[in-house]
Amino acid sequence: MIRIFIDADACPVRDETYRVAQRHGLQTFVVSNRMIAIPSSPLIERIVVTQGMDVADDWIAEQVNAHDIVISADIPLAARCVARGACVLDPRGRILDEDAIGMALAMRNLMEDLRATGAITQGGRGFTRADRSTFLSALDTAVVRGRKRAAQAR
């Protein structure tokens, strides 16, 4: 069975994820280190982890299985989840899979180094309505693909 895990502390697409999860009947875990409001649904579960560096990431990485879907902009977490067979989507709808995660990690590390040297001082572009739309489409696609892969694995 496919499950969805949301790295929720700074996730701008929680509401969109809830709607897709409800439509497809998927168990969804909203993982954060603080209380976050969630819809009242037997399919949606709030997981509040203790405060600390990467505690929510660790919980997700330990729980996720093949065919699960993870929503996160955290590239190192994405790499850990992909290694376990999960499909990872960032909030802009970019699929981070085995083919894409290596480049994503390299770019993250490069940008981190450039920021540390002061070569880059601006953040990324703002989150747009088009980003939400792209995310919704990518999440629906990930659910359909995940179901097909899970059925083939049986």
Image: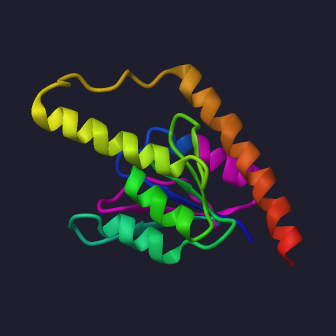
Q: Position of residue 114 (x, y in %)?
A: 20, 33
Q: Is residue 73 visible?
A: no
- Residue drawn at the location 46% of the way across and 77% of the way down: 62
Residue extending furthest toward the left: 117
Q: Position of residue 20 (x, y in %)?
A: 69, 47
Quick one: quadrant of the N terminus?
A: bottom right
The correct choice, above or below, for 63 with respect to 98 in the image is below
* Magenta span includes 39: yes
Quick one: quadrant of the C terminus?
A: bottom right
Stretch in magenta: 16-42
Residue 88 as seen in the image, left or right of residue 55: right
Front-lying residue, 39 or 139: 139
- Residue drawn at the location 51% of the way across and 76% of the way down: 63
The correct choice, above or below, for 34 with respect to 61 in the image is above
Q: Position of residue 98 (x, y in %)?
A: 60, 56
Front-lying residue, 136 or 107: 107
